[in-house]
Amino acid sequence: FLIARKGNIKAATDMMRNSIQWREENLPATHASIGDALSLNCLFIGKPAIDGTATLYFRSALFDSRKIPSEQFVLCAAHGVEYAIKNGAVAMTVMVDISQIPGAPNLNADIKFIQKFAQVMSDVYPERLRRLLVYPFPWYGKAIWSLISMFLDTRTKDKVILVAAKGEERLPSEVCNYVNPYDIPAAVGGKDKKTPLPNMQNTMIQSAVINNKVTTSTTTSTSTSTTTTTT
């Protein structure tokens, strides 16, 4: 928070309070709040990047804001970030695969989702985003990017890497500078053809277990402290 607010203690404190408030109001996510978005398998947590950061993949072709509000996708993404953090992640590498998928909605970029997701990453999880890779980025995408970048703050904008493909390249070679291609599922252009795509619905169960452990630990600690004080 201090880094995000350039050492301004008051601004960092206000930012931290707002972050805590947002998380209390929206998390932990439930099947009722993000179940529809999760069912589309449009995002998942992958294997760590080369630098050890957690990876969060988006499959843009599967997003369908005509049926599901953009806000639910944002909350779904926040759940993924929260899940990664609770499992030890310090920072995130976000991978956005914009390839088309036969039979999928394959809609144009959801500006509203991009704007809100960028805002959540910037305001609620400051400095957690190490980089955001968009691939394979088409030559005609510059016009779209000019529109999208208007909604991003400078620090977030500087972390976005647009990776163009060469010829019929499914996974641009530049992406491999950040994530081992054998750790990237084939479904998003990588060479890992054995590991099934993670089912984010399972993270809801695991998150519940983690939250329960944290609550139990806190309750036990409080009880012990009370007993000691009484004694």
Image (spheres, rainbow, N blue to C red):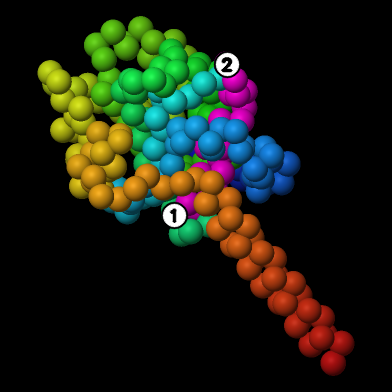
Question: Callout 1 environment at 10 Å: few (<14), some (14 to 19), or many (20+)?
Answer: some
Residue 187 percent across, percent down from the top left: 30, 36
Can residue 172 be seen in this snapshot? yes
Residue extent of the magenta highlight: 66-85
Which quadrant: the N terminus? top right
Numbered tag placed on residue 66 in the rendering:
2
Q: Residue at x 41, y 33 (%)?
A: 58
Q: Position of residue 162 (x, y in %)?
A: 29, 24
Disc nearer the start of the sequence (2/1): 2
Q: Residue furthest left?
A: 167
Quick check: 159 above or below 115? below
166 w.r.t. 122: above or below: above
Q: Residues within 10 Å of mark 2 (few under 14, many from 20)?
A: few
Count of number-bearing discs: 2
Please state the horizontal and vertical placement of residue 188, each as a whole percent of the image: 30, 34
Residue 228 in magenta?
Answer: no
Instruction: Looking at the picture, tell me which residue is in the foreground, 49 or 73.
Output: 73
- Numbered tag placed on residue 89 in the rendering: 1
